[in-house]
Amino acid sequence: MKRRIFINGRFLTQPVAGVQRYARELMRQLDMLVGDSASLPLVELVCLIPPENIVYPPWKNIELKKVGSNKGVIWEQIDLPIYLKGQLLFSPANIGPCYYRNQVVTFHDASVFAVPEAYSPIFRTKYIFGFRQLANRARLIITDSKFSQHELAKYLQLPPHRFQVIYLGADHLNYVQVDHHFLQKYKLHEKPYIFMIASVSQHKNYARVIEAIKLIQSDIQFVLAGGNYQHIFNSVDLNSLPNNVLWLGCITDSELKTLYENALGFIFPSIYEGFGIPPLEAMQCGCPVLCSAAASLPEVVGEAALYFDPFNVDQIAETIEYFLAEPDLQETLRVKGYQHSAEYHWSNTARDTLEILFGCLES
């Protein structure tokens, strides 16, 4: 008889930002793994979801099951544990039922502690409470990098070995088709541009990048994109942008891949990241990366990017100007980035995660 591992599927009801990207790509790969009956004959996965309208993912081997009668936080904290009755739960999106012990949780970073000013008071309070409760009750906590492992240990006052590091993947855009009409719509095929994508939060550092752009003596265009999740983040003001900056807001994966593949370079100026998927996405698409030297980014991005101090506006501007003036450097970064990003596969993330979950079933 197969043994079941249950998944907290609330992430399927949420907009796709970094956390939800992780959960969806991980589940895509887990779906393929559990379909291999030769290697995993005794495990099946069941993704539990609240009674809401969702777009069902095209999984073939993971069962989707609606349970309970509530939605949102109430469903996660009350309906979900009542249904489970002590069975093993995996919560991949930073939060789970706070008083449920037979649970593995992924904490992606410690940003609510490290950069509290970036979040709305309600969101920050909820997540700090949730992290503290789960850190002391969950059987195991997964995190994205060694940097996050030590940050979480510091803020939650726990030994680092309580947090198991599993790196994320970066090959998800391989499944996506480009949209050349998108370039024509915004006339982005007419001149070179540097691209940036991030949620519009203070710790993503949009404000300093915009100040740096004003200092650059070049007619290079800048294309910015990202979600403005005001219920989560204290957003920066993107009004009165320079004339050479195009703000696109939220974009599709097809548009994202198109922008990466056609950009002269990609800039990622974040001051705090638990992992940092976008630089690796850019590298996978052959786009050279200019990157902040803060937090987990040197660990994840390695020697495949041109680094700068994200707190120094002058240095950001100087780094961009140096990059623009050196075509040989651009090509070197393109090659290094593509080679480096090839090390990050979601299939590896899924195998390591499933090994942990299977171990919890056996212990």
Image (cartoon, helix red, strand yellow):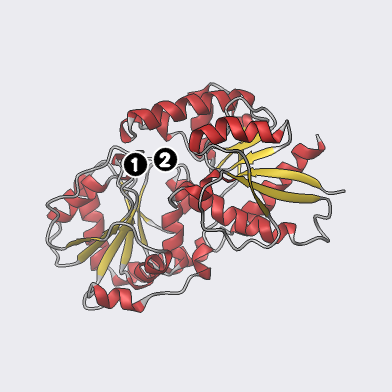
Q: Position of residue 266 (x, y in %)?
A: 33, 61
Work out whether residue 83 can be spotted: yes
**Alpha carbons under labels 2 and 1: distance apart:** 7 Å
Describe residue 245's horizontal placement relative to residue 287 as left or right.
Answer: left
User: Is residue 139 depicted above or below 247 in this figure?
Assistant: above
Binning the other alpha carbons within 10 Å of mark 1 as few (below 14), some (14 to 19) or many (20 upward) gives some
What secondary structure is marked by label 2? loop
Q: Nearer the viewer, residue 127 or 260?
A: 127
Q: Quick one: quadrant of the C terminus?
A: top right
> Does the CB distance between marks 2 and 1 fall below 8 Å?
yes
The residue positioned 33% from the left and 32% from the top of the image is: 120
User: Is residue 349 depicted above or below 80 in this figure?
Assistant: below
Q: Position of residue 160 (x, y in %)?
A: 59, 29
Describe residue 333's horizontal placement relative to residue 65 as left or right.
Answer: left
User: Is residue 72 depicted above or below 245 in this figure?
Assistant: above
Binning the other alpha carbons within 10 Å of mark 2 as few (below 14), some (14 to 19) or many (20 upward) gives some
Work out whether residue 168 can be spotted: no
Residue type, mark 1 in image: Ile
The residue positioned 22% from the left and 78% from the top of the image is: 190
Q: Position of residue 99 (x, y in %)?
A: 61, 24
Q: Nearer the viewer, residue 296 or 130?
A: 130
- Residue 319: quadrant of the picture: bottom left
The residue positioned 60% from the left and 37% from the top of the image is: 105
Q: Position of residue 262 (x, y in %)?
A: 34, 73
Residue type, mark 2 in image: Ala
Query: Which numbered dot is residue 174?
Result: none
Pointer 1 residue: 271
Pointer 2 residue: 295
What secondary structure is marked by label 1? loop
